[in-house]
């Protein structure tokens, strides 16, 4: 069967996976054996990344977790067999190269690359090159990591790359004129939104280029998940504006009850990484362990109703934008990523 790409959302429709928003990692991994497979999970030591690590290990995989905070990673991963922790900082170009170089030197094929780590709603920071931190961490670091590990992905049999995105892509398209806020006032929500749009566009183009090598790529919206530390630096005013927290900074109980637990939040990542239902489908944005629908302005979204936060915007699966972002990423990183 000839693979088709998801340019302009061509494949962006649910396939009736049998799962839903309440499905857990245990549900989606049932019957799937990862023995002999190797996975790399960025941020695989906290939140939904840790749940993904646990699930892969239980299914028989060996998992490598690159971490900026090695001590925290080791603490959180205590007792898990077949997990290795390595040093890597997604905002540090040299650190990424060193991590990838060490892995390539081992000669192992890489079956699963889960680009899970991310930051959200942080104050304006820049990496050593002057790039805005949410773009640097959430997209550029993962683009570089994927490029450097490409030969190992090609060595595997039907490798998959999963980019953990977010409903947050709906906040902003990618700003090609000023991605690093050099000529406009910094707004953390816009920085986060464009970095998540970048995750989606990267997935579209990566899959279109990689499918002929047997490598498929996916973008994931985990859902609104409780007990992650993603929003640890976000000003409380942002949550209050969105109607999720009261004047004292407490989440409304009615909202909290509707949030996903960590095992539910990680389910779509695990589904995209392992489901046989999507062997011939890639480049799609997924949520609730299925492919999401295209949001053409027909979905009413309410931040206080997490179940309404679904769908993918057309600008984040657009063919021209995807190709343009690929070229811009190569230029910003001073690399050539020949994904063929």
Image: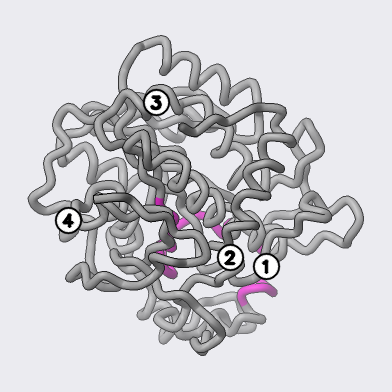
| Tag of residue 169 | 2
Who's the residue at 52% across and 48% down the image? 205
Q: CA gap, disc 4 to disc 1?
A: 33 Å
Mark 3, secondary structure of its residue? strand
Q: CA gap, disc 2 to disc 3?
A: 30 Å
Q: Which numbered disc, 4 or 2, marks the residue that appears first in the sequence? A: 4
Q: Is residue 227 inside the magenta stretch?
A: yes
Closer-to-camera residue (318/258): 318
Q: Is residue 300 inside the magenta stretch?
A: no
**Residue 336 placed where, x, y %?**
63, 28
Crowding near the residue tagged with mark 2, few <14, some 14–19, many ≥20 C-alpha atoms within 10 Å: many
Q: Are circles 1 and 2 on residues that touch, CB within 8 Å?
A: yes
Q: Which residue is mark 3?
A: 85
Q: Which residues are magenta?
A: 218-239
Q: Nearer the viewer, mark 3 or mark 4?
A: 4
Q: CA gap, disc 1 to disc 2?
A: 6 Å
- Is residue 283 toward the left or the right of residue 315 in the image? left
Q: Nearer the viewer, mark 1 or mark 3?
A: 1
Q: Which residue is mark 4?
A: 26
Q: CA gap, disc 3 to disc 4?
A: 24 Å
Closer-to-camera residue (57/219): 219
Q: Which numbered disc, 1 or 3, marks the residue that appears first in the sequence? A: 3
Q: Quadrant of residue 233?
A: bottom right
Q: Are circles 4 and 2 on residues that touch, CB within 8 Å?
A: no
Mark 1, secondary structure of its residue? loop
Q: Which residue is mark 1?
A: 172
Q: Is residue 200 above or below residue 170?
A: above
Q: Are circles 3 and 4 on residues that touch, CB within 8 Å?
A: no
Q: Nearer the viewer, mark 2 or mark 3?
A: 2
Secondary structure of the magenta portion, mostly?
loop
């Amino acid at each position: 069967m000839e693979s088709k790409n998801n340019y302009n959302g061509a494949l962006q429709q649910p396939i009736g996976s049998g799962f839903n928003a309440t499905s857990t990692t245990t549900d989606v991994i049932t019957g799937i054996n990862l023995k002999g497979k190797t996975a790399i999970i960025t941020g695989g030591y906290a939140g939904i990344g840790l749940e993904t690590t646990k699930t892969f290990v239980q299914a028989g995989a060996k998992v490598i977790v690159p971490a900026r905070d090695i001590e925290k990673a080791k603490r959180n991963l205590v007792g898990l067999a077949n997990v290795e922790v390595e040093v890597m900082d997604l905002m540090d170009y040299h650190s990424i190269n060193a991590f990838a170089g060490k892995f390539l030197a081992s000669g192992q094929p890489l079956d699963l690359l889960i680009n899970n780590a991310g930051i959200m709603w942080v104050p304006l920071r820049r990496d050593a090159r002057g790039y805005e931190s949410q773009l640097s961490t959430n997209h550029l670091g993962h683009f570089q990591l994927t490029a450097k590990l490409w030969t190992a992905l090609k060595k595997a049999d039907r490798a998959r790359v999963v980019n953990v995105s977010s409903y947050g892509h709906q906040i902003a398209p990618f700003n090609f004129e000023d991605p690093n806020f050099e000529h406009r006032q910094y707004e953390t929500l816009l920085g986060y939104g464009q970095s998540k749009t970048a995750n989606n566009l990267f997935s579209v183009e990566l899959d279109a280029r990689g499918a002929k090598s047997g490598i498929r790529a996916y973008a994931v919206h985990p859902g609104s998940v409780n007990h992650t530390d993603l929003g640890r630096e976000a000003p409380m005013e942002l949550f209050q504006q969105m109607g999720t927290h009261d004047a004292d900074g407490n989440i409304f109980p009615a909202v909290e009850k509707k949030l996903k637990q960590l095992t539910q939040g990680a389910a779509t990542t695990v589904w995209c990484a392992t489901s046989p239902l999507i062997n011939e489908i890639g480049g799609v944005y997924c949520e609730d362990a299925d492919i999401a629908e295209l949001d053409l302005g027909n979905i009413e979204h309410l931040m206080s109703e997490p179940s309404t936060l679904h769908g993918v915007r057309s600008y984040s699966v657009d063919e021209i934008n995807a190709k343009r972002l690929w070229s811009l990423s190569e230029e910003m990183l001073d690399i050539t990523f020949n994904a063929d």
